[in-house]
Amino acid sequence: MSNRLVIGLDVGTSGTRAVLFTLEAQALATAHESYPLETPHPGVAEQNPELVWQAIARAVSAIARQVPSNDTIEAIGISTIFHTLLAVDRRGQPVTPSITWADTRARSQVERLRRDVDASALYQRTGCPLHPMYLPGKIRWLREEAPQQFARVSIFGSIKDEILFRLTGRRVVDRSVASASGLFDLRRGTWDSAILETLGISEDRLPEIVEPTEVIGGLTREAASVLGLPAGTPVVAGAGDGVLSSVGSGAIGPGQMTVMIGTSGATRLVASQPVLDAQGRTWCYYLALGRWVAGAAINNGGLACDWVRHNLMPRPLPDAGSVEFDALETVARQAPVGSGGLIFLPFLTGERCPYWNANARGVLFGLAAHHGPAHVARSVFEGVSYRMRSIVEALDEAAGPARELRATGGFARSPFWLQLLTDVLGRQMVVPSAEEASALGAAGLAMIAVGAVAGLDDIARFVTARPGPAPDSLNHARYDRLYHLYFDIYWANQKQFEAIAALQDELG
């Protein structure tokens, strides 16, 4: 008897995962391929789209080889990272690399945009605060700093539409990724004409917008040959990885908040309409089928751990992957709660929520003679956890207190970090059964597109969850004191952050 299967393709910051699912959301096979995040200069964080495509081809072809000959791939659903700019010329050839969410080089352009537009009104229309992560700053940077490249641009796109183009020959973007660009009017459902006018570009220089559950076409013969799948295999537009993580975690009901730490970190709540914060601390993006996701995010999650592991430890540790924490965790376990009074501010690539400070920089505060590698290692786990607490609290205030926290991302597989964050928050979390949440979310949209399931709630029901550890009251009290000191250090250095960011631009 033949089986009907779908592939969830999750294209992330550090690599891509292809997962083969049954129509009951059972994962049959997984393949992972990595690629670098290039950071050659201060503020630069970009990727070569060709390397991303090659990784996709290797991962999907590895999955394809495991599909029995009598089984059928019903569709491929696509999840990608948000907030990338990948501009192409009239021939469809990339003019820029994929400029990622972690890229902060447009800081000065964003400051000038704040003087040119009503930033609060723009946030209310687009759900995206003005920040170098979003496309308005990136497009203005390209126009001012690379005018020859800018003049060649036909479409200001993203890694999502580039992948869809390579798969199907159609250059379109899903409404979810579009909604996280800073160029999309949430309520009108179109590109925002006011910000486009400010940037000096027209709507025809942006990709066509499609629904996340739309089958945009079949695999071209060329793509099918590379991926090892039949030509014509349906490709579903999919959505952004963050919002699909909520689907794959089973957290789409009222009051269910996902707390994710992977390369970055985020908190998310699903709603039936856009939810915005009066103080502009959070964001709101489209999911699919009339659902929205309100959330808050940090730049430096596993990214900070990986940097400390490679640069601050006394000898190279075994490479466990960019968001696998075992190697650094082994060292961190040797230090006490609170890292002996060492506090790490993990702003290695600036910061997003809740204060949208692209100038923020990393700080090791309180360094003393008694501190060693273990204290440094533990302080990064604690510093990222303090940052996560700040966005849990911001989202609680903006969208209402969450009744349940679901731990997702690579950190949820680490008992050490799961307990640590639980103690910092002082709140118990639950851990979903699905480890590849974004891939399952993408596969779920593919299931909906081909009529295998009716809607998002059906996908969520496939996901079970177990209780995480209870918070330790003594540790929480210690962390609470350190958390408030952490904020004091952050706010005391605003002018210094701005000054050092400018000097780094000057000195290189």
Image (cartoon, helix red, strand yellow):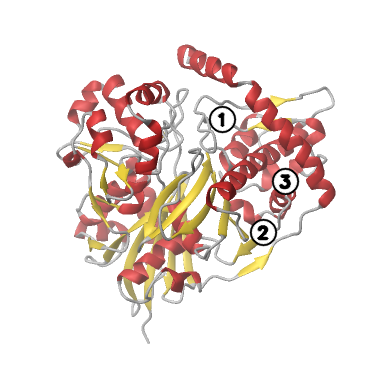
Q: Which of the 4 image quadrants contains residue 45?
A: top left
Sequence-first disc among 3 and 2: 3
Q: Position of residue 31 (x, y in %)?
A: 46, 59
Q: Secondary structure at mark 1?
A: loop
Residue receiving disc 2:
429
Q: Position of residue 36 (x, y in %)?
A: 45, 39
Q: Spatial distance from mark 3 to mark 2, Cα to Cα?
A: 12 Å
Sequence-first disc among 1 and 3: 1
Q: Position of residue 393 (x, y in %)?
A: 62, 45
Question: In the rendered structure, which amino acid carries the disc numbered 3?
Answer: Val
Residue receiving disc 1:
348
- Between 289 and 157, which is closer to the camera in this rendering? 289
Q: Which of the 4 image quadrants contains residue 139?
A: top left
Q: Spatial distance from mark 1 to mark 2, Cα to Cα?
A: 27 Å
Between circles 1 and 3, the one closer to the viewer is 3
- Disc count in the image? 3
Residue receiving disc 3:
424
Question: In the rendered structure, which amino acid carries the disc numbered 1?
Answer: Leu
Sequence-first disc among 1 and 2: 1
